[in-house]
Amino acid sequence: MVANTIAERLIECRGNKSQALVAKETGIAPSTISMYENGERVPRDSNKIILAKYYNKTIQELFF
């Protein structure tokens, strides 16, 4: 349940960018971005920080 909500938020923030571009610009593996957006995995804390900064959101907005 929580992973799916996070996935929806990440997809919404990504907008028209590709997963590959987000992966390249954040340094997070494309397969990891895909797992986050498919609700298969919840980001670890270090990746939460990276993604929040990348999307110009707070960690709370994206992950809680």
Image (spheres, grey):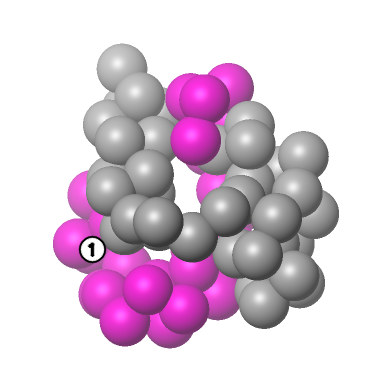
Quarter of the image for residue 8 reads: top left
Quarter of the image for residue 29 reads: bottom right
* Circle 1 Cα neighbour tier, 10 Å, few/some/many (<14 / 14–19 / ≥20): few
Q: Residue 7 at what x, y percent from top left?
A: 39, 36
Residue 52 in sight from this viewpoint:
yes
In this figure, which residue is indicated by the disc labeled 1?
A: 60
- As drawn, is 5 to the left or to the right of 31? left
Instruction: State whether residue 62 is above or below residue 51.
Output: above
Q: Does the magenta-highlighted stretch encompass residue 32? A: no
Residue 63 in sight from this viewpoint:
no
Give the magenta part as a residue range: 37-64
Q: Residue 33 at what x, y percent from top left?
A: 63, 46
Which residue appears at 31% of the width and 17% of the height?
A: 1
Which residue appears at 40% of the width and 56% of the height?
A: 16
Instruction: State whether residue 59 is above or below residue 16.
Output: below
Q: Residue 57 at what x, y percent from top left?
A: 27, 75
Q: Residue 23 at what x, y percent from top left?
A: 70, 62
- As drawn, is 9 to the left or to the right of 31? left
Query: Label 1's element?
Result: helix
Quarter of the image for residue 13 reads: bottom left
Which residue appears at 35% of the width and 24% of the height?
A: 4
Kind of residue at badge 1:
Gln
Instruction: State whether residue 62 is above or below residue 52.
Output: above
**Residue sticking out furthest to the top:** 1
Q: Nearer the viewer, residue 17 or 9?
A: 17
